[in-house]
Amino acid sequence: MDRLKHAFAVPRPLRAPLALVMPFALGLALGGALLGGPALTQTQNRTEARISTAAAPSAEDHVVALGAASVPAPVVIAPGKRALKDAPPRMVFAEITLPAAPLDLGPAFRRGLTPERAPIVVASGKSGLLALASLGDVPIRDMRPAIALVIDDLGVVPDRSAHALRLPKEVTLSFLPYGGVSRPLAQAAAAKGHEIFLHVPMEPRGDADPGPDALRTADSTSRLRSKLDRQIADISEVAPIAGMNNHMGSRATADRRLMAEVMRGAAERGFVFVDSVTTPNSVARAAAARHDVPFLARDIFLDHGEGPDFLLAQLDTLEQQARARGVAVAIAHPHETSLEILDIWVKGLEAKGLRLVPVTEAIEIEARRSLLAMVQ
């Protein structure tokens, strides 16, 4: 079983899309009778995990199998049918093998569920057969609520941008492509171990200036592609980029064509995307789903109000959200007051039972959280 897990380990950028699939698949376990499948019974015991090979899906099919039953109860959805509203076009189900008994895994996780006793989640996608790590590994590493902190707008004001590098390496740093010191600071931040993002300038509503070469809704598709490719190259030449988030963009992120081009660029490079959520009309999540781009939306802007009292109140809200959901995402900016307060705040997280994580880890946690909520 260990060899199987190793051979089919899922790369990080592909784990988050599985979270879109699993809630629906496990929901079918509760409603199997409505779909015409055999009723689940309490009398059948789970055996060791195994991968279902009953289906022979096409290259375009996604297969999700929970193998943990002596007599699995199959539910078949016709290949090619969309089973999830926001799923990418090719994310369809050929077969879902449901466990014959409910999965009561909550306490077992905290005791340390072994891989041999845990279900295995399997999907066939662009890279062939992939297996998500055993559910038994999910919460054992660290049960503390997690916070992903992004400092963006970096690279324009040298001293304050450099100050951000004094924060722990778990803080994700997002650099504007046109910042005068973006390249040297991104290189230094990567050497320190920070996760590096590109802060993509995008068209806002109103008269605010997002900066040179911002992505605009009036741009042709080829011009959008040229701008984005050049911005990515500006930073990636000196530091590895893990993802992107939008700078301004209240108009751009509501435009389907523009965001499709952004997600194309992210998907081609294995980036993740964080929606700064500068408009409630953002289509970034749907565009990310269509292009298989791991995605998170920020929960809290820490410093869009004035003064330290506002920031401290926002930090309290952030901590509450992390405790309630298991993970929360915040964005702050290189303001002098913000950086000074954050310098102190991060040092007290461990005593509060909280932890900082990079954005890519927060995406993994969110995916696992969604999955575990359905099986516990």
Image (spheres, rainbow, N blue to C red):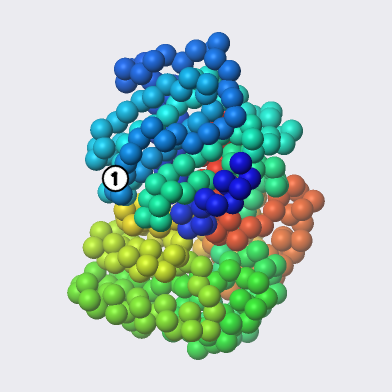
Q: Secondary structure at mark 1?
A: loop
Where's residue 5, x and y in %?
58, 47
Q: Is residue 40 above or below residue 59?
A: above
Q: Is residue 368 above or below residue 175?
A: above
Where's residue 373, x and y in %?
54, 33
Give the side of residue 88 with respect to residue 172, left or right: left
> How many callouts does the rendering have?
1
Quarter holding the N terminus is top right
Q: Nearer the viewer, residue 93 or 153?
A: 93
Where's residue 348, x and y in %?
77, 56
Going 33% across and 57% down the picture, which residue do you hit? 291
Say if residue 321 shows up in the picture: no
Residue 80 figure quarter: top left
Q: Dot 1: within a 10 Å radius of its alpha carbon, few (fewer than 14), some, or many (20 or more) residues?
A: few
Quarter holding the C terminus is top right
Where's residue 204, x and y in %?
33, 68
Give the side of residue 263 with respect to residue 22, left or right: left
Q: Nearer the viewer, residue 171 or 202?
A: 171
Q: Is residue 285 above or below residue 44?
A: below
Going 62% across and 54% down the picture, which residue do you hit? 147
Q: Nearer the viewer, residue 346 or 188?
A: 188
Q: Nearer the viewer, residue 85 or 252?
A: 85
Going 46% across and 42% down the picture, which residue do you hit? 122
Give the side of residue 104 with respect to residue 74, left or right: right
Q: Which residue is mark 1?
A: 58
Task: Give the residue type at disc 1.
Answer: Ser
Q: Is residue 215 above or below residue 3?
A: below
Going 20% across and 74% down the picture, which residue do you hit? 220
